[in-house]
Image (cartoon, rainbow, N blue to C red):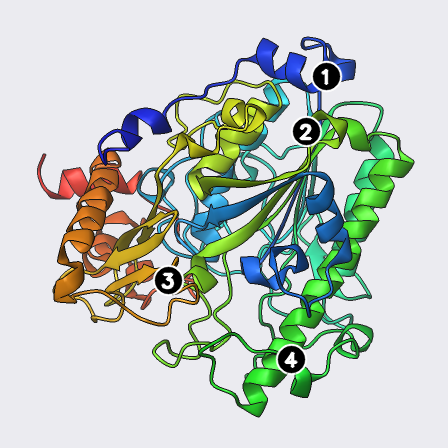
Amino acid sequence: MKRREFLKVAGCGVFTLASASSVLSGKESANDSKPNLLFVFTDQQSWDMVGCYGNDQIKTPNIDKLAAEGLRFKHCVSSSPVCSPYRAMLLSGQHPLYNGSVVCDIQMLPPKGTSFADMLNAAGYHTGYVGKWHLYGGVRTRGIPAGPMRYGFDNEFFTNNCDLNYGADKAFYWSDDNKRVKFGKFESDGQTDQAVEFLDKYAGKKPFALFVSWHPPHNWGPGPNWGYPAPAKYENLYDADKIKLRPGCPDTKKIRRNYRGHMALCTNVDDNFGRLIEKLKAMKVADNTIIVFTSDHGDILASRESIPVWEHKSHPQQISCRVPLILGMGSKIKPRVSDMLIGSLDLMPTMLGLMGIKPPKTCQGSDYSKAIMANRDEVTESVPMFFWRKNSDWRGVYTHRYTYAFEPSSASKLINVLFDRENDPHELKNLFGLPEHKDLQARLHALTLDWMKKFKDEHIPWETLKHQIYVDPAAAKARWEPYHVKSAALKGRPIDLIKKAQGS
């Protein structure tokens, strides 16, 4: 495929309400035949931290079973591999320059009736959201008021916004009157209780769409000694001294301890995922429920000496940006492994398409539902990547074979990368700037520029952009994430504010 053809291809595959309903249920859009949706995503779990992706030491039997019975995507890419930007893309279908969530802890702009939940509500679904939110902006220790800042999740909404203490003594959620309610158990276990209660109330009675966002296996506290502590019964499943580290990973006791905890947390969320699947089966709705398992981004786990140990994500390497994506649709899809490339922007329109709901025109990703049902994995050539941060703004592209990203000349020179994953599957040899790969680098650079042009992204540095977007100027004083300020609300869409600042 020629590099300019992808823009045409990326817009194809719109699945109409009637066609999707007939594929999934054999009927059209009657309420009793609408497919339900269970969309589950963890935080900071790379694709290689799930058994079905080839990790023979991690214990994730429930996720693996879904993969064996459904559709497993080899290449799902977190286009901006950090927490808030991913969530905003998932719920809006829009690029960060349009939804506003350019970096973590910025308040995503209300989509005005076109969010993922808005579209589901309009189609007659009862919506629910459980777990990490991280879209309210500014200080994290506050609840999300009912109304437009819940982006359409007006039915059931249980979240602690963003809190990094998962232990049974501290894990909590905000009630609707903005009071902390403690779980009295490990956070992901308590959140799963809430999800199970939702299914008890609505499964089989009304079409539902439930989003479950677990914070583990993200690193957590308490105190300054951040790590990956997990409940003892899960840590005891792993021997730190026997864990096989990723190729190229430094071998230290601390890294091994972090691997052990991270893998134990992955097993914890797998257990909880199994609880949700069993509940769907018990309620006799599993075969009419689209089940999605994925993650917002990966975790580098200090596996590269060239990347600072505190930077768990935010890099274009696949251990940061490549995540699991597994789709279950009961008997309505044949088990297989897909080579399709799919990115964060494509998730909302594609899932809506599979549910028979036409995505709103505001979505900037693509609806690949028709291609999925027709096994047309070759539908797209690449996924765009983009990132804003002090001294490391970068843009890039992920193809079936290559990972490429570049920084402007004024940046920190840490994110100029070109990896050939076919010959170097662990991305240990950076080919960027090597004379013998000059032509390849030029092609990937041109492809990246094509994506940037699609989104009107002029690569404005974060240090410039942050002074143009916030309502409260104090937010612009934050080095990167404005989580210490009262408000990180925006004046408007960053793309519009950039134009205004340029006088155009």
Q: What residue is drawn where x is 87% and y is 37%? A: 281
- Mark 4 residue element: loop
Q: Position of residue 416 (x, y in %)?
A: 23, 64
**Looking at the picture, does residue 167 appear above or below residue 182?**
below
Of helix, strand and loop, which one carries label 3?
A: loop
Q: Which mark is residue 243?
A: 4
Q: Amino acid at mark 3?
A: Asn
Tell me the quarter of the image containing the N terminus. top left
Amino acid type at image mark 1: Ser
Disc 1: which residue:
25
Q: Does residue 223 appear in this view? A: no
Q: Which residue is mark 3?
A: 423
Of labels 4 and 2, earlier in sequence is 4
Determine which of the numbered discs, if any, sits on residue 333 in the image: 2
Q: Is residue 274 left or right of residue 45?
A: right
Who comes first in sequence, dot 1 or dot 3?
Answer: 1
Cα–Cα span, label 3 and label 2: 33 Å
Q: Residues within 10 Å of mark 3 (few under 14, many from 20)?
A: few
Mark 3 → mark 4, Cα distance in angstroms: 25 Å
**Residue 317, quarter of the rendered image:** bottom left
Would you identify the image quadrant in which residue 375 lies?
A: top right
Of the two numbered discs 1 and 4 on the same chain, state the one appearing first in sequence: 1
Q: Residue furthest right?
A: 282
